Amino acid sequence: MNTGTPFGAWILALLLTVSGGAVQAKTPPDQLLIGMNMNNLLTLDPAAMTGNDIVGIVVNLYDPLIELDPQELTNVRPALATSWEVNDARDLITFHLRDGVKFHSGNPVTADDVVWSMRRILHLNLAQASVWKSYGFTKKNVDEMVRTPSPGIVEIQLPKPNDPKLVIYSLAALGSVVALDSKTVKAHEVNGDWGNRWLTTNEAGSGPFRLDSWQAKDVLNMSRNPQYWRGEPRLSRVVFRHFQESQTLRLMIEKGDLDIANNMAVSDVTALSHDPAMTVDTVKKGTIYYVAMSMKEPHFANPKVREAVRYLIDYQGIGKALMNGYGIVHQRPIQVGMPATLPDPGYKLDIPRAKTLLAEAGYPDGFDTTLRVLADQPFLNIAIAVQSTLMQAGIRAKIVTGTGNQIYGAMRERKFDMLVGRGGSGVEPHPHSSLRALVYNPDNNDAARLTNFQGWRTGFYDKQLNTDIDQALLERDPEKQKQDYFAIQERYDALIPALVPLSQMVDSIVVRKDVKNYLPHPSATTFLRDVYKDESQATDPSSGGKGL
């Protein structure tokens, strides 16, 4: 139902613009073009996805049971489920599904599909299984614990004591627990892979948009679902385009060839903030920039070496020089703004102290290591800054750059030395969300494959800390729970963790003013179903911001 400019002609015009041709494209009024760096976009399978970028795509192809309000995260809104309740024992959540919803294939969305989709996450045991395993779900128990006692009803029995509010937040925020068309996916299963290979580049959802095509590190096209249960989206098409360089993104959105630009350098965002045709939306997210060390590597298994690294990072210098627009200095695992977050411990660059610690650890002359990092900003600049200060104490770190799969893939396999990265979930408005992702590690064995847990990736394990985190989650007295979280942060700090928090993420998104109802979401689940363009707000890209 595309009523705008023919897509092929528009892409041709766009290419001419990029190549410096005379034709200048302008995105059609019913289509949205989003520019972003797609290096870390590795799969479209909701059960296997990692990173923030893919979540914003998946939530527009699929429907969840419930969702978080982007303007008030503690407000849980209905989606496929019209209502839900928790039993008195706090171990059973019952969802009531709406009638009449259909998948893109035309198959009806049933409770059986929802149950199968969640069971699939545990049976596949890929990235998104980690959260649910921390709640006690396993391959062995999920078929019993997630069930449909009657049509239209989904029951989730909690395998171990938990805070049901957190589980509800996880269902609403993560983007992985969505309804898959089980009939369609089963038809594409290969050797019992639950359709994972097919879903890597395809979709089987019921969301407001349908996948047309995806070419890795190039372009992803979605078109509206005219039968969407909330009503037909106002946009006929959404196109995500890959741009490696921030300056290219800036040029494209200035010319009107992009409607939205993500992953831009701060200098370019700052320049565009003065353009009357643009708005800059800044969103504080729960994700944390960090320097990680692998405790499977002998140097970093030594706590004195890890402590030395703690004092070989110029937190304040990095924050001031490199993180403006990317993040704010933060040295705790629980995100800023929560009552349970302790003030920063105030670590600073201290070369003499670091040298003393290295000598006590048996490395008076330092050692050689590698420092992995994405070839993107601000990661690369952080790595260069850290490399410089490490060198001053004798730690000679060779920087290894690469794509998300090359860098985070090595971390997920626990085959790295040091790494500058970003993670930590924080998508649920609950302290446990950050601790689960950055600290919690209930099983440190390689076979556990808790690949979405940064604690497991680094090999950091403390039985008492895990117990404390479990107990704090169940505490019903808010003041006692807050004190428990204070104690957890103090213990974590005293144990000299393998992951050193640097900064909490701030995301700056540039949006042209004719784009309406675009609400960036702190948990990356940005919904596009209500977005549209108001041509009366458009400006001529060649007129210096004056109206058309």
Image (cartoon, grey):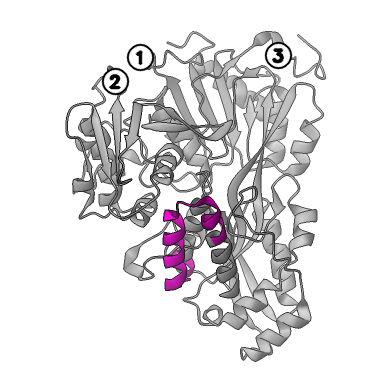
Q: Earlier in the sequence, mark 1 or mark 3?
A: 1
Instruction: Please tell me whether mark 3 sits on a helix, a strand or a loop.
Output: loop
Q: Badge 3 is on which residue?
A: 538
Q: x, y (%) of residue 487?
A: 56, 66
Residue 478 on the magenta span: yes
Q: Badge 2 is on which residue?
A: 102
Q: Which of 16 and 230 is in front in this view?
A: 230
Distance of mark 1 from mark 3, alpha carbons?
Answer: 29 Å
Q: x, y (%) of residue 329?
A: 71, 55
Instruction: Please tell me whether mark 1 sits on a helix, a strand or a loop.
Output: loop
Residue at 29% x, 53% y: name it: 137
Q: Residues within 10 Å of mark 3 (few under 14, many from 20)?
A: many
Query: Can I make out residue 254 in this image?
Result: no
In this picture, is 448 found above or below 422? below
Q: Nearer the viewer, residue 212 or 547?
A: 547
Quarter of the figure that contains the C terminus = top right
Q: x, y (%) of residue 404?
A: 51, 53
Q: Badge 1 is on which residue?
A: 227
In this picture, is 419 found above or below 322? below
Residue at 71% x, 51% y: name it: 328
Instruction: Name the chief secondary structure element in magenta.
Output: helix
Circle 3: residue type: Ala
Q: What stretch is highlighted in magenta?
A: 456-483
Mark 3 or 2, which is nearer the eye?
A: 2
Circle 1: residue type: Gln
